[in-house]
Image (cartoon, rainbow, N blue to C red):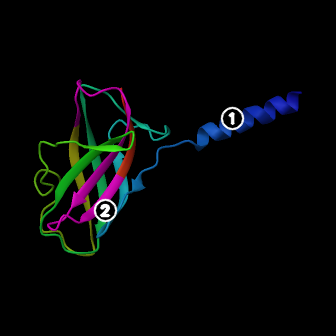
Amino acid sequence: MFKSCVLTLSLLLTMQLGICLEFHDCGSKTGKFTQVTLEGCDTTKPECVLKRGTNSSITIDFALAEVASAVKTVVHGKVLGIEMPFPLANPDACVDSGLKCPLEKDETYRYTARLPVLKSYPKVSVMVKWELQDQNNVDIVCVEIPAKIQ
């Protein structure tokens, strides 16, 4: 009896430790993200908790395989399979984001942006789709971030 309790407890602990936040590539074409950081996000959880009425910041480190003369940010929230656009105050990723355009081929870059989580947002689990697109609307980087608005 004791052995089965220990085995069950060990299995549950292993399963709990195995759940962690994963960022997924959702169609990067000319670049590849190497690291994504969301301020205040507990990466030991399966979703990043975004608190309503606060601001968070996102940092994306990426490598670029082609020149980009311009970069814009496009963000969507996917709820129940439906993508809804998330308007940003500054969609120009070449302004106040750590990027200085044009971006050169075979270089690495760090992009940062502020993410306002409005009080009016519903409390819901959402897949955040964050894209950095070049002058031709091609995804340099596309990353999906599992999140929960609370």
Cβ atoms at labels 2 and 1 below 8 Å apart: no
The location of residue 7, given as percent across then percent down, is 79, 36
In the shown orientation, is residue 16 left or right of residue 26? right
In the rendered image, which quarter contains the C terminus?
top left
Q: Quadrant of residue 138?
A: bottom left
Q: At 12% from the left edge and 42% from the top edge, which residue is drawn?
A: 89
Q: At 30% from the left edge and 54% from the top edge, which residue is drawn?
A: 60
Q: At 60% from the left edge and 40% from the top edge, which residue is drawn?
A: 17
Front residue of 43/147: it is 147
Find residue 57 and name its label: none
The amino acid type of the residue labelled 2 equals: Phe
In the shown orientation, is residue 49 left or right of residue 13? left
Instruction: Give the mark nearest the N terminus, 2 or 1.
Output: 1
The amino acid type of the residue labelled 1 equals: Leu
Find residue 12 and name its label: 1
Front residue of 110/52: it is 52
| Tally of numbered discs | 2
The location of residue 57, given as percent across then percent down, is 26, 41
Q: Nearer the viewer, mark 2 or mark 1?
A: 1
Instruction: Say which residue label 2 marks.
Output: 62
Instruction: Classify 10 Å Cα crowding around label 1: few (below 14), some (14-19), many (20 and above).
Output: few
Does 139 sit above or below residue 23?
A: below
Q: Which residues are magenta?
A: 116-143
Front residue of 143/138: it is 138
Does 100 sit above or below residue 54?
A: below
Does 51 sit above or below residue 41?
A: above
Residue 149 part of the magenta segment: no
Q: Quadrant of residue 16?
A: top right
Q: CA distance from mark 2 to mark 1?
A: 36 Å
Q: Secondary structure at mark 2?
A: strand
